[in-house]
Amino acid sequence: MNPYRLYLVTDDKQNLETLKRVVAEAVAGGVTMVQVREKQGDLRTFIARALAVKVILQGTGVPLIINDRVDVALAVDADGVHLGQSDMPVETARRLIGKDKLLGLSIENQQQLIEAQSLPVDYLGLSAIFSTSTKTNIKKEWGIKGLTDAVAQSALPIVAIGGINTANLDAVIASHVDGVALVSAICHAQSPKQAAMNLLCQMGGEL
């Protein structure tokens, strides 16, 4: 199974109870990976939220990924960590988390895409495909052509993130990307379960 197919990234502005409900519903709807993202709170809050999600994911086979923080990933024994370009160097992170954990890296331009091919990472998060309200410091908007070219160039699996929703999903899937990462399309849906099911249905057998 492709773990990157429907990749939920949590909304750090939602409170703990909402977070737990969204993740539980989204997993029931078929999401294949969950990344806990925490840009606002302190370290204890991050660990508490990550542990709450870990409990929900137990026994589901859905990997728990921690955004940015290797220490939090180690503290909660997550399945992996996703790093940005200004976070810990991936070589250091790999040494700390070991070879069996998943390690993802955000890619914001062509040069980073080329350099990443020789790094000890499992997958790349191409950011951002479209401009989005949840990420305001976008370096590059890849668009569909940029995404398609990146997928063709990369030997590593690519997850597309940024502004993806049901309106543009068909074009994203046509790039043959390995997965799509979503925040608003699931977290802000009236029914995260139904939203995940609808997205997977729209993807069909493509990914």
Image: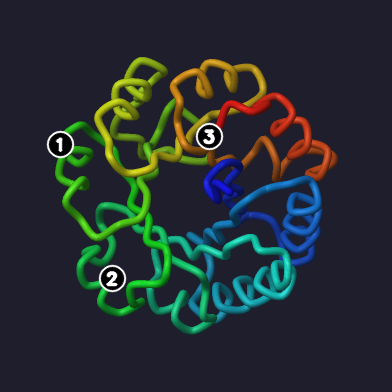
* Residue at (64% x, 39% y) in the render: 184
Residue 124 versus residue 70 in the image, above or below: above
Q: Amino acid at mark 3?
A: Ser
Identify the secondary structure beneath mark 2: helix
Q: Quadrant of the C terminus?
A: top right
Q: 164 or 29, which is in the foreground?
A: 29
Residue 79 spot, x, y in % from top left: 51, 69
Q: 45 or 161, which is in the foreground?
A: 161
Which is closer to the viewer, label 2 or label 1? 2
Q: Is residue 146 left or right of residue 182?
A: left
**Where does label 2 land, which residue?**
94
Q: Amino acid at mark 2?
A: Arg
Residue 62 spot, x, y in % from top left: 64, 60
- Please identify the residue farthest to the bottom as the structure is shown: 75
**Where does label 1 land, which residue?**
111
Residue 31 spot, x, y in % from top left: 68, 48
* Distance in Å between CA atoms under marks 2 and 3: 31 Å
**Where does label 3 land, which residue?**
133
Q: First in sequence: mark 2 or mark 3? A: 2
Identify the secondary structure beneath mark 3: loop
Q: 145 or 32, which is in the foreground?
A: 32
Q: Quadrant of residue 88?
A: bottom left
